[in-house]
Amino acid sequence: DTGVSQNPRHKITKRGQNVTFRCDPISEHNRLYWYRQTLGQGPEFLTYFQNEAQLEKSRLLSDRFSAERPKGSFSTLEIQRTEQGDSAMYLCASSLVASYGYTFGSGTRLTVV
Amino acid sequence: QKEVEQDPGPLSVPEGAIVSLNCTYSNSAFQYFMWYRQYSRKGPELLMYTYSSGNKEDGRFTAQVDKSSKYISLFIRDSQPSDSATYLCAMSSPPGTALIFGKGTTLSVSS
């Protein structure tokens, strides 16, 4: 296990379609985070899990967005009825509870056309 | 006003220069401060972290936190072309909770 893995790396979808991204964290990490980053901006927090429990959600996470972490291992982020404004890099990170900083994956770049 | 302000640059320096990167913040509850480096098309990579006010040094990198001024800095000594990247400051209240990031400063070091 060499790091946080995200799939796919790139996704192009038509407006109105649903998309799902997957994140596989570092195996011993019990916290998993989702961030969104647009060009020229820093990552914006979306949500995080401790094991399978979703502990916090940003108000950025509209009702079109849903995240799951079944069994406390990998996580999925689904966006329903995509809009052009959803085009961004979606970053996943993981950490141990109460540790400093996270380990980020390389992200999934979403383009909505 | 955003919670964390960071000048996006770009900042261009010659190899060997000392680089100073800065962020200001408004939320006095922040206690944990981090600097991440992000190369193009990659995720952010943790460089330094500090707790509360003070300095921390790691090789060519020094992180400073001044909580009274709500101001944090990252200094890079003897900058190298490989340091060319975007530098993001980030902060949180308890560790392991949501990190709030600055916009990032793009640094270019020319040989």
Image (spheres, rainbow, N blue to C red):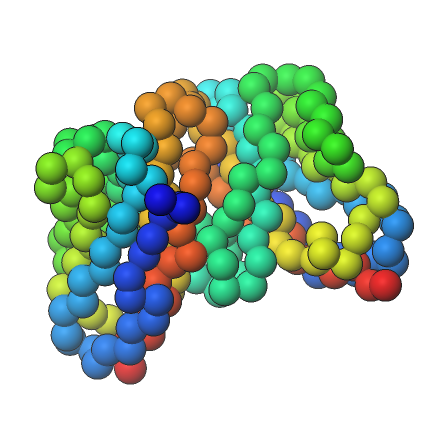
Q: Quadrant of the C terminus of chain A?
A: bottom left
Residue A13 seen by the camera: yes
Q: Position of residue A12 (x, y in %)?
A: 29, 77
In this view, the residue in front, B4 or B40, is: B40
Up/down of B21 relative to B62, above or below: below
Q: Is residue A56 left or right of residue A41?
A: left
| Residue B97 place in picture, x, y as percent | 36, 29
Quarter of the image holding residue B39? bottom right
Instruction: Give how far across and how far down residue A70 sits, in percent.
Output: 11, 41
Q: Quadrant of residue A111?
A: bottom left
In depth, the one of A6 and A50 nearer the eye is A6
Q: Quadrant of the N terminus of chain A?
A: top left
Res. A58 in view: no
View extreme (front): residue: A1
Write down the quadrant of residue B74 in the picture: top right
For image coordinates 81% across by 49% down, the residue present is B79
Describe residue A106's horizontal placement relative to residue B61 as left or right.
left
Q: In this image, B40 relative to A22: left or right? A: right
Count the marks: 0
- Left or right side of A4 for A69: left
Coordinates of residue A13 in the picture (x, y in percent): 23, 78
Residue at left offset 30%, top offset 43%: A25
Residue at the left extreme? A70
Up/down of A107 relative to A11, above or below: above
Residue found at x 88% / y 50%: B16
Give the residue at x 82% y 40%: B77
